[in-house]
Amino acid sequence: MLFLKKLSNKDKKVVVGMSGGVDSSVAAAILKREGYTVIGVTFKTWPKEECGTSFGRACCNLEAITRARAVAEQLKIPYYVIDLHDEFKKEVIDYFCSEYLKGHTPNPCVVCNEKVKFGALLEKARALGAAYVATGHFAITEYDKKIGRYLLKEGRDKSKDQSYFLYRLSQAQLKHAIFPLGGITKTRTRQLAKRWKLNTFNTVSSQDICFIQDQQYAEYIKKKTGVEMREGDIVDRSGKKLGRHKGIPFYTIGQRRGLGVQHKEPLYVTGIDVEKNNIIVGTKKDVLKKSLMADDMNWIAILPTFRCMAKIRYNHKKAPCSVTKLDDGSVRVEFDSPQEAPTPGQAVVFYDKNSVIGGGWIKESQN
């Protein structure tokens, strides 16, 4: 079963964000076969002078654009490349760099979905006469008449579900979002691409941060901001100096490798003190936290204090917890059992079974 919006013929024009990969290609093909009027769009995130040198896995490099255009020609749909590099730099790259410099670990995919794919791209879609944007995300949207709200749910393929990255979509954005792959698996997606002879059927899935070239994050941040990486001290929880670090952006909460500190048991990054330029380390038990605080919340389903399951990062296993909404709009999350390395700057996303309740940005954690 495919989870597509049931629209009248006059409303069935949709822009599909085509990255040149198999998922977005199949999404476009499914919509075309279901009778939608489909427009293929690749949004260019690189400035003109960098497009020819962008690396292989970049989602909008020249090779990817060539693949997306070929699929559009095969499907006989209009295709455009839209320059959104200014919006992408402002909303995603600048955010990414500033968060690392604050000692946080950002999640640019969440911000890109909110601000670019279902923000700037949706505006461009409307200019093309389309009220909807579709992507190759493995997730499901549906309208709940009882509560009068659009819901976001996990995709059928739990191993590829991307609802975590979409939790910040507003009701207005969910209303205009279509996820054709929500009801099928990744394996089925590739099978359909091969059956329909799409040239993207065997493309490698993108990994990690799409806009980072063959550099470490800290090197990329230095290049983009001009900020020099300052070495500092690695200290234990009592403040004892154990070694030296290469610069704040090289480290994240929960990190074990690359510390260069000898100790009788493995050490992990447990804190980042930007003001003192210190990396704080401890043992495994020190990264286990029973509770956290999160703010800048986005609610898809509205609930008071509640019990639910929560994920503190994309690959984290959902864990049972209690959530209390505070007067300032933030929340306190109490887990039934300690969780490993809740990290400031990452998102905590709440689930009721397979439905996203909402989420926010982690700002601190507690034992």
Image: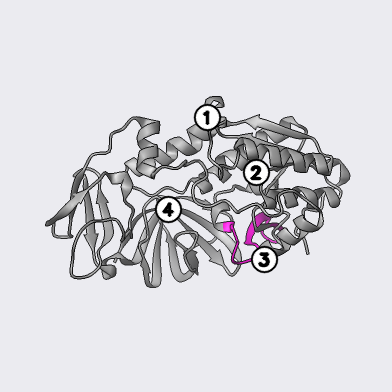
Camera-near label (3 vs 1) is 1
Sequence-first disc among 3 and 1: 1
Whether pointer 2 and pointer 1 mark residues with C-beta atoms closer than 8 Å, the reply is: no
Q: Which amino acid does the dot numbered 3 rest on?
A: Arg
Q: Which amino acid does the dot numbered 1 rest on?
A: Glu
Whether pointer 2 and pointer 3 mark residues with C-beta atoms closer than 8 Å, the reply is: no
Q: Which amino acid does the dot numbered 4 rest on?
A: Gln
Identify the residue at horizontal 68%, vertical 32% (top origin). Answer: 81
The residue nearer to you, when weighing 321 against 125, is 125
Q: Residues within 10 Å of mark 2 (few under 14, many from 20)?
A: many
Residue 19, numbered label: 2
Q: How far apart are labels 1 and 4 at the CA level? A: 29 Å
User: Helix, strand or loop at disc 3?
Assistant: loop
- Image-quadrant location for residue 231: top left
The residue nearer to you, when weighing 299 against 29, is 29
Residue 50, numbered label: 1
Q: Which residues are magenta?
A: 141-163
Spot occupied by residue 71 in the image (x, y as percentages of width and height): 76, 43
Whether pointer 3 and pointer 1 mark residues with C-beta atoms closer than 8 Å, the reply is: no
Sequence-first disc among 1 and 4: 1
User: Helix, strand or loop at disc 1?
Assistant: helix
Identify the residue at horizontal 28%, vertical 58% (top origin). Answer: 269
Camera-near label (2 vs 4) is 2
Q: Is residue 113 visible?
A: yes
- Image-quadrant location for residue 138: bottom right
Q: Is residue 347 left or right of residue 131?
A: left
Q: How far apart are labels 2 and 1 at the CA level? A: 17 Å
* Residue marked by disc 4: 346
